[in-house]
Amino acid sequence: MLFNKDIGIDLGTANTLIYIKGKGIVINQPSVIAVDTGVRKILAVGKAAKDMIGKAPEHIKVIRPLQDGVISDFEMTASMLRVFLKGILDGAGFLTRIRIVVGVPSGVTEVEKRAVEEVIRQMGARDVYILDEPMAAAIGCGLPVDDPMGCMVADIGGGTSDIAIIALGGIVTSTSLRHAGDKLNEAIVTYMRKSYDLLIGDQTAEELKIGIGCAYFEEGAEDLDDGHLLYLDAKGRDIITGLPKTIKISSKEIHEALEEPIGVIIDGIRNTLEHTPPELAADIVSHGMVLTGGGGLIRGLDKLITKNTGLQVYIAENALEAVAEGTGKSLKNIDKLERYASKKLRR
């Protein structure tokens, strides 16, 4: 008799989340791996490896093996996943049938999907299902994806922003932008260099984005929370003197830095709406859209989208975990999953 072990994986550019049926999310770690190139030994994965970014000596290579939502370093992705899955799969015996669903951006190519599938197969999975991230996100936050009534989701992750209109168990129209959290970080780094001659790292930029990032200010308003702007210290190196320097930055300045890249995401949402069949467009106007992913949590993004599209926008309660939970929940009904998945691959 075969026993099933069902696993859902959100293989994200910024974070990898792993969902186990019956247990929920058991792994939520940065998608980073650190390797000692001298002895070819893995030193750390996840948060421990992320903490080494920008600080490691020459012989230690800190790698983000996924870029723009797809695998850029096959070997390192496999090594990272092996470490994450080791404890989970150790108990799987000969009679255990491992079924894994992986969330990928809706715009990835068949070649890129095959690369993801190959990495997962190396983990010992018998059945591999590739699920588009907006579909996984919609399932994860409880949207009625099987109904004829259309629903809309925008999943703004680290490497990609995936926007989709879903009805009758499938994606009717979608837009995938390789323009998301990482691009927002880059915009903050660029702003600090141009405005203050201050060179900061990606981690500092991310802290500023999460801490005081803001997508929308009401016309003429000078406050954000409790009548006050938010402030954080940005620490880096002065480009002119070469010495360490700290600058106090306001949420208004981060808003200015993020204006252009967030504008690209807004254009992606508008583009998706423009290609939506009229009957479904009417459903979306009635029911609004849902934001998932870390980027969806930027202050005021929901209001900015409403201002630009007229849609009511809701932020999912489980925005950060929606894709991972959706991959796991989809395994509850294999018949439906085979309809949702863009591809099923058997070993």
Image (tube, rainbow, N blue to C red):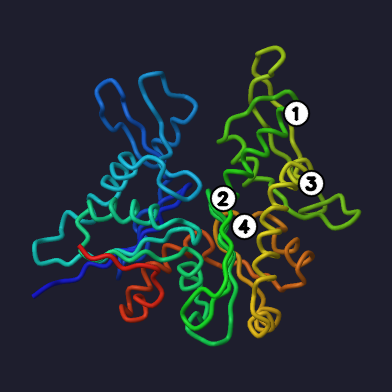
Q: Say which quadrant the N terminus sits in.
A: bottom left
Q: Nearer the viewer, mark 1 or mark 2?
A: 2
* Of the pair 287 and 210, the residue shown nearer to us: 287
* Of the pair 117 and 209, the residue shown nearer to us: 117
In screen coordinates, is 99 left or right of 51? left
Q: Nearer the viewer, mark 3 or mark 1?
A: 1
Q: Looking at numbered disc 1 in the image, what kind of residue is underneath it? A: Lys
Mark 3, secondary structure of its residue: loop
In screen coordinates, is 346 left or right of 56? left
Q: Looking at numbered disc 4 in the image, what kind of residue is underneath it? A: Leu
Q: Looking at numbered disc 3 in the image, what kind of residue is underneath it? A: Leu
Between discs 1 and 4, the one toward the N terminus:
1
Mark 1, secondary structure of its residue: helix
> To which residue does mark 3 refer?
229
Q: Decide: marks 3, 4 in contact (CB < 8 A)?
A: no
Label 3 neighbourhood size at 10 Å, few (<14), some (14-19), many (20+)? some
Q: Nearer the viewer, mark 2 or mark 3?
A: 2
Mark 2, secondary structure of its residue: loop
Between discs 1 and 2, the one toward the N terminus:
2
Displayed quadrant of residue 347: bottom left
In screen coordinates, is 153 left or right of 124? right
> To which residue does mark 4 refer?
297
> To which residue does mark 2 refer?
178
